[in-house]
Amino acid sequence: MIKTMTIAATAMLVSAHYAGASSDAAWNALFAKVNGTCIGQSGMDTPEATAPVVFDDATGKVAVLLRGSMGKGKSKSKVKNVNLICLYDKKTGKASIEEYRWLGR
């Protein structure tokens, strides 16, 4: 009886652990959605993007840093190199983008 209860309790604990974990496919789908949203809202043609930085569930945000050029035209003075940070809200699916600069630059 005790052996059966121990096996059942162990099985429940192990299955509870895996039920709460996200699969690689789920993470990849989230990262694809984050990158697509952030790149789409950035206004850049071909930005470089970092790997997503996932904050804890209490925050519910994913951050991506983007860098690239904005502006059009043959004149280089109209093209501006920018660094952007994108915060994606996992709950709403909305992103906020702002330009950032390193301190001292």
Image (tube, rainbow, N blue to C red):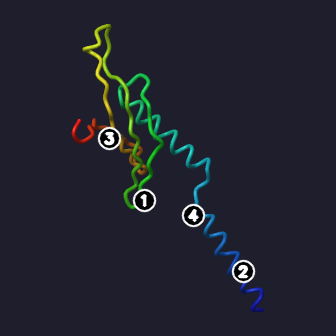
Identity of the amino acid at label 4?
A: Gly
- C-alpha span from label 4 to label 3: 28 Å
Name the secondary structure under disc 2.
helix
Q: Earlier in the sequence, mark 1 or mark 4?
A: 4
SS assignment at label 4: helix
Mark 4: few/some/many CA within 10 Å (<14, 14-19, 20+): few
Relative placement, left or right, of 65 versus 25 is: left
Frontmost of labels 1 and 4 is 1
Q: Position of residue 4 (x, y in %)?
A: 77, 86
Cβ–Cβ under 8 Å for marks 3 and 1? no
Marks 2 and 3: in contact by CB < 8 Å?
A: no
Q: Secondary structure at mark 3?
A: strand
Q: Which residue is mark 2?
A: 8
- For the residues labelled 3 and 2, the Cα–Cα distance comes to 47 Å
Lower sequence index among marks 4 and 2: 2
Residue under the image location 31 percent in, 10 percent down = 73
* Circle count: 4
Viewer-nearest residue: 33 or 53: 53
Distance between the Cα atoms at labels 4 and 2? 19 Å
Residue 71 position (above or below residue 102): above
Q: Is residue 62 above or below residue 104?
A: below
Q: Report crowding for label 1: few under 14, some 14 to 19, many 20 or more residues within 10 A (C-alpha).
A: few
Q: Which is in the foreground here, disc 1 or disc 2?
A: 1
| Figure quadrant of residue 77 | top left
Give the residue at x 62% y 70%.
16
Of the numbered discs in the image, which one, if any, rests on residue 96? 3
Q: Which residue is mark 4?
A: 20
Residue 18, image x and y in percent? 63, 64
